Amino acid sequence: MRRPGRSSAVLACALAGAYALTACGGSGDDSKAALSVSSAYMPQPVSEMAAGFLTVANKGGTADRLTSVTSDVGPVSVHETVGQSMREVKDLDVPAHGRLVFESGGNHLMFDKLKRTVRQGDTIDVELHFATSGAVKVEMPVKPATYRPATGH
Ligand code: CU
């Protein structure tokens, strides 16, 4: 079977309009962001504040952007660590064929005012909101305060 030539595929994309264009031009779905979340955890908090860590992997050929985070235990902000201090950021990129990593000493989710007591063994419902992929639900287990994930990916 003869495959359509490149020029006719490009023309089809152009005719389909700007929105559909983002889905054209790659092989398969490679031109879209394809996100998956792993290694989510929250160290058992000692106060009303808690940190959360996870990894967002993007198998797709287009970057996406984490724009906000919500949870069932209260407000969440996104922090990065610069030197010895941390600061809130508006959004963070998930590079194409890359990862956005939240880890101790680096980027982290900040739960500013927990509205209930959170203990080891609990699971927090977290929702990550991405610019193009929309909402991704994450179950974040609460681990011992001293828990560190195994290194090496
Ligand atoms: Cu922080």
Image (cartoon, rainbow, N blue to C red):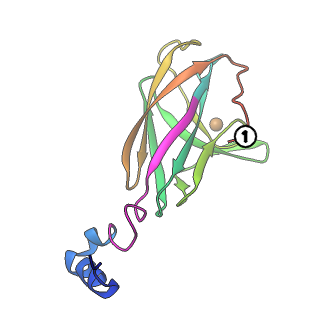
Q: Residue at x 41, y 24 (%)?
A: 72
Q: Residue at the far front: name it.
A: 1
Q: Residue at x 31, y 84 (%)?
A: 5
Figure quadrant of residue 121: top right
Which residue is nearer to you in this view: 79 or 25?
Answer: 25
- Residue 98: x percent and y percent? 58, 56
Quarter occupied by the N terminus: bottom left
> Label 1's element?
loop
Q: Which residues are magenta?
A: 23-40
- Residue 126: x percent and y percent? 45, 31
Q: Please, what is the dominant secondary structure of the magenta stretch?
A: loop
Q: Residue at the far bottom: name it.
A: 7
Which residue is nearer to you in this view: 133 or 45?
Answer: 133
34 within the magenta span: yes
- Does residue 117 appear to the left or right of 72 in the view shown? right
- Check disc 1 and report the residue beneath it: 152
Q: Quadrant of ligand 1?
A: top right
Q: Residue at x 50, y 54 (%)?
A: 59
- Label 1 is placed on what type of residue? Gly
Which residue is nearer to you in this view: 66 or 49?
Answer: 66
Q: Residue at x 46, y 39 (%)?
A: 69
- Residue 36: x percent and y percent? 47, 43
28 within the magenta span: yes
Figure quadrant of residue 39: top right
Query: Against 131, is 52 above or below?
Result: above
- Residue 106: x percent and y percent? 70, 43
Quarter occupied by the C terminus: top right
